[in-house]
Image: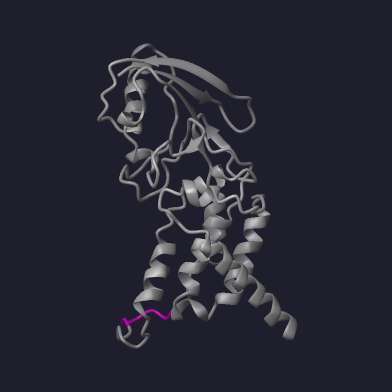
């Protein structure tokens, strides 16, 4: 397969970037998108040119670092698929492919296609945890949880923090990410002790990072590689309102 790649090249967050064109031939349809970029970089290095910087780690769709904006879609054209799991057979032979980094002020460009997503980490540090005593594990039946609740909590915990929801949102909102991380604790007994403090601190940090507001376009849910439901945003809003009402009563 042959492709024309239009790849965003940018030295850092302070410099102006632009698209550079790279023709690439003899691409196997069985290559993943990242393998294709490796193939491109090998050819660039052999020519004495600087390779394209992009992020990856597990290449199994579980770490969230591989996110790229491909032909106007976070992670590319396939639904419920991360960039590392996207294969070149999803594209047509001879197609022109545009590749960009996530576009959000809260995700400053490090270089080329790599962005700094430490803003997500700071949201988690603000409250995305439970405080428990260390020592012997408690009896598994001491905190009974129904399968329905456990399944929903697990659905929320499936979020890999890739940032596709931010990239898909016209406002660069991180509501789906924050909602998933809040919901995974809010739905289980262990997370209810610090629930009100958690939602307050995480929403406050999300706003401080400069993410936009949610206008309910559903783009985040549609392009999330793990299919996280926007129902969790409604749950987060209820948790947030509850925390404010409790503070007002006191």
Quadrant assignment, res 29:
top left
Relative to residue 102, is residue 49 drawn left or right?
A: left
The front one of 58 and 243 is 243
In this orientation, which residue lies closer to the viewer: 194 or 85? 85
Name the residue: 55% across, 76% down: 195
Q: Position of residue 102 (x, y in %)?
A: 54, 38
Q: Tell me the quarter of the image containing the C terminus.
A: bottom right
Question: Within the magenta stretch, is there residue 199?
Answer: no
Figure colour scheme = one colour
Where 214 falls versus 8 (above or below)?
below
**Residue 226 falls left or right of residue 171:** left
Give the total of numbered labels.
0
**151 is higher (above) or lower (below) than 90:** below
Numbered range of the magenta stretch? 132-137
Where on the picture, by quarter, is residue 141?
bottom left
Q: Is residue 163 visible?
A: no
Q: Quadrant of the N terminus?
A: top left
């Amino acid at each position: 397969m042959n492709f024309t790649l239009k790849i965003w090249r940018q030295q850092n967050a302070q410099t102006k970037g632009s698209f550079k064109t790279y023709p690439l031939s003899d691409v196997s349809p069985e290559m993943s998108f990242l393998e294709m970029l490796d193939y491109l970089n090998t050819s660039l290095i052999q020519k004495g040119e600087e390779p394209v910087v992009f992020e990856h780690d597990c290449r199994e769709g579980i770490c969230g670092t591989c996110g790229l904006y491909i032909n106007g879609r976070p992670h590319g054209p396939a639904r419920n698929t991360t960039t590392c799991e996207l294969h070149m057979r999803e594209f047509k032979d001879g197609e022109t492919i545009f590749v960009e980094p996530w576009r959000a002020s809260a995700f400053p460009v490090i270089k080329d296609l790599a962005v700094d997503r430490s803003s997500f980490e700071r949201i988690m540090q603000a409250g995305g945890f439970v405080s428990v005593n260390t020592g012997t594990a408690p009896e598994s039946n001491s905190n009974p949880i129904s399968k329905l609740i456990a399944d929903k909590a697990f659905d929320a915990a499936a979020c890999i923090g890739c940032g596709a929801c931010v990239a898909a949102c016209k406002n660069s909102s991180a509501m789906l990410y924050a909602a998933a991380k809040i919901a995974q604790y809010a739905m289980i007994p262990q997370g209810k002790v610090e629930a009100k403090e958690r939602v307050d601190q995480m929403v406050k940090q999300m706003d401080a990072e400069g993410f936009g507001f949610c206008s309910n376009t559903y783009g985040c849910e549609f392009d999330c590689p793990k299919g996280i439901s926007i129902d969790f945003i409604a749950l987060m809003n209820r948790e947030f309102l509850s925390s404010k009402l409790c503070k007002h009563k006191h």
